[in-house]
Amino acid sequence: MTLTTERLVLRHWTEADAESLYEYAKDPDVGPVAGWNPHKNVEESLEVIKSVFTGAECYAVCERETNRAIGAVELKLNGYTDMTEREDECELGYWLGKPFWGRGYIPEAAAELLRRAFEDLGMTTVWCGYYEGNSKSKRVQEKLGFIYHHTCNEVPVPLLNEIRTGHTSYMTREQWLSGRGL
């Protein structure tokens, strides 16, 4: 499955993406704010591709011109998220390599995944969260039209062995349709 937007290609990860993933995931400004450690080497990035980026709706974010993986966007379906147990709800997750910040790529990619969630997959609600201090992720959710739902003050972050404050937002199919003028 490949999805396209004006500037991006969203495609499934392949083992050939390991070097590109490492290049962006090793940056200490990228992973920790999202709850994961910077990658230590290409082998670790390859293992992440094989064991973490395996969800049916997990996509590498690529610029159209290069088709090189520069980030990730995913709809985490039931079984891959702790935000909901419902089959008709999912969680949106994303990250982007630092050299590409500020270009609007993640809102563009996430908007396409919201379209997919509501039109193709029949979702009724998409959930999304961010940890306290991740203002870029908060801003993406605001741009997309997510509605604040709640804050949890003691959220375990197992990959970093930390406890953080997490904020959760949501979007219903009806909100998505009304935001598109439908």
Image: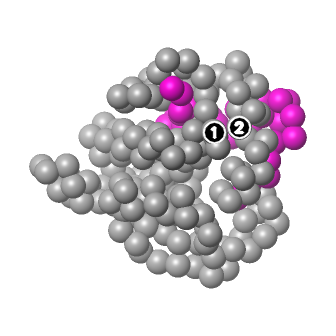
Q: Earlier in the sequence, mark 1 or mark 2?
A: 2
Viewed as shown, does residue 81 lie left or right of 16? left
Q: Which residue is mark 2?
A: 24
Q: Would residue 80 be seen by someone viewing this image from the given angle?
A: yes
Q: Residues within 10 Å of mark 2 (few under 14, many from 20)?
A: many
166 in magenta: no
Identify the residue at horizontal 55%, vertical 19% (top origin).
67
Q: Are marks 1 and 2 in contact (CB under 8 Å)?
A: yes
In this orientation, which residue lies closer to the viewer: 63 or 16? 63
Q: Which residue is mark 1?
A: 99
| Percent of width and height locating residue 180 | 19, 49
Viewed as shown, does residue 80 lie left or right of 6? right
Report the amino acid beneath label 1.
Answer: Pro
As drawn, 69 above or below 81: above
Identify the residue at horizontal 56%, vertical 45% (top origin).
101
Identify the residue at horizontal 55%, vertical 64% (top origin).
135
| Percent of width and height locating residue 93 | 53, 50
Q: Which residues are magenta?
A: 35-63
Residue 40 position by quadrant = top right
Q: Would residue 110 be seen by someone viewing this image from the given angle?
A: no
